[in-house]
Structure formats: C-alpha cells, structure tokens
Image: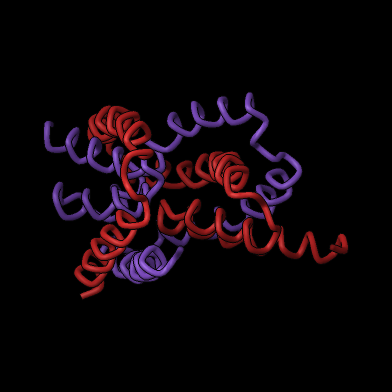
Amino acid sequence: MWIAVTAGFISGIISGMGIGGGTVLIPILVFVLRTNQHIAQSINLLYFIPTAVIALIVHIKNKNMDFKLAVPIVLFGILGALIGSRLAVSISSANLKKIFGMFLLCMGTYEIFRK
Amino acid sequence: MSTFKKYFKFSVIGIITGLCNGLFGSGGGTVAVPAMEMMLHAEEHRAHATAIGIILPLTLVSIFFYVRNSFVDWNLTWQVAIGGILGGYIGARTLKRISARALRKIFGIFMIIAAIRMVF
C-alpha cells in the first residue's frame, strides 16, 4: 500500500510544479507497481477528476477559465476521446504500452527543448 | 481570424487533445496548452486554466469506456490519489522556489528513458 501512496505522492509533487502529470505517473505505476498499461492509464484518468474539479472551481472564480474557447474545443474533443478510448480498450496492454512509449518519447523531447 | 479558420483550429486542438486523453489516458494538457498558446494566442495562465476545463469532460468520456471494459482498480486508485493530492499541494507550494526550466529537462530525460524501455 505504501508503495502506491508514495508513487502518487512523488508524481503529485512533480505535477504540482506544473510538469508532466500523467506522463510521469503512468511510467512510475508501470515500472514500480507493475500494473498493466490499461490500469495505469485508468488510474491517471480517475485521479485527474477530483483534482481537476477543485482546480477548476478556483480558476472559474478567478475568471481565468475561457468558456468561449473551452466549449467548442470540448465538442470536437469528445469525438477525439470517443475514438481514442475505444481504440485503447480494443488493443492489448503490451501494444498499448509500446504506443504510449512512442508518445512519451515525443513528450519527453518536447519538455527538454521547450523554453 | 475568420469564423471558419477559428473553428478549424478548435477542431484540430479538440480532436488531438481528446484522442491523446482517450488513447494514452494522459497528455491532454501537454497538447492543449501549447496548442492554445500558439494557434489561438491564449495567454499562458488562461491557457492552463482553460485546458483543465477542456480535459475534465473529455476524461469523463474516456474513463467511461475504461471502466465499462473492466480496466479499473479502485483500491490502487485510492492509494495513488491520496498520495497524489498530498504531493500536489506540496509541489504547488515549492514551485516558486525551484527553477522549473531545469526540472523540465530532468524529467524530460526521465520520460525519454522510460519511453525507450516501454517501446523495447
């Protein structure tokens, strides 16, 4: 149990600093806790919900949330989420891990070269 | 910006963000924030806030399919979430004291090493 709490704690510190988030938590879960790729991604999605609700309330109160941008992007985004999640659940965990690895390679490279 | 051009940009950002969120269970923010900054000239702080408002509903859609296909471990999720919330609070308070740029590079390297191990 403490390994899982510690894994969450470490990735929480990192994402609290504004870096990564799921791109840090998911590899930790896969390598340290040996969860399969689907479960690691599901944990990240579920864990995002309560933290995002709290952050969003603060952002809406401070008028930082731009609804004129968010609403149309969400409508198109739902289409993407439907395709992406149905694709994810239809492939094996081993293959999903490989595809995720390629995505992580792009994200890691981006983090290194961004200003 | 013409209405057509604007909605074209909305659709590109939306579909790619949603696709990553569903397929990788993460990365929505890493895509949406720079995309809104570069394509829609959103200011950084607003882009961050708006990205959360975009990714939250998309996450609800994605997680529905994961849970329906039994890709869920509630026990582990709770444990990770408790640690995550504590860590997130500490991380947010420490942010001002450490150089985010140096940290980004360190974690960029960590992500690349993890990525290579995942692919091979």
Q: Which of the pair B28/B89 is nearer the observer?
A: B89
Q: Colour of chain B?
A: red
Residue A81 percent location from the top left of the image: 55, 53
Q: Which of the pair B5/A99 is nearer the observer?
A: B5
Tell me the quarter of the picture where residue B87 sits.
top left
Q: Is residue A71 left or right of residue A35?
A: right
Quarter of the figure that contains the N terminus of chain A: top left
How many numbered discs sit on the rendered protein?
0
Which residue sits at x=20%, y=49%?
A: A35
Q: Is residue B105 left or right of residue A63?
A: left
Q: Give the image's coloring scheme.
A: by chain
- Relative height, residue B115 to residue B92 (above, below): below
Q: Which of the pair B69/A62 is nearer the observer?
A: A62
Residue B28 percent location from the top left of the image: 50, 53
Residue B64 percent location from the top left of the image: 48, 41
Q: Kindly give the residue lying farthest to the right in the view shown.
A: B2
Which residue sits at x=84%, y=63%?
A: B1
Which residue sits at x=78%, y=60%?
A: B7
Q: Colour of chain A?
A: purple
Q: Is residue B75 left or right of residue A86?
A: left
- Relative height, residue A48 to residue B22 (above, below): above
- Relative height, residue A97 to residue A17 (above, below): below
- Relative height, residue A107 to residue A9 (above, below): below
Q: Is residue A66 left or right of residue B98?
A: right
Which residue sits at x=30%, y=69%?
A: A98
Residue A29 percent location from the top left of the image: 22, 48
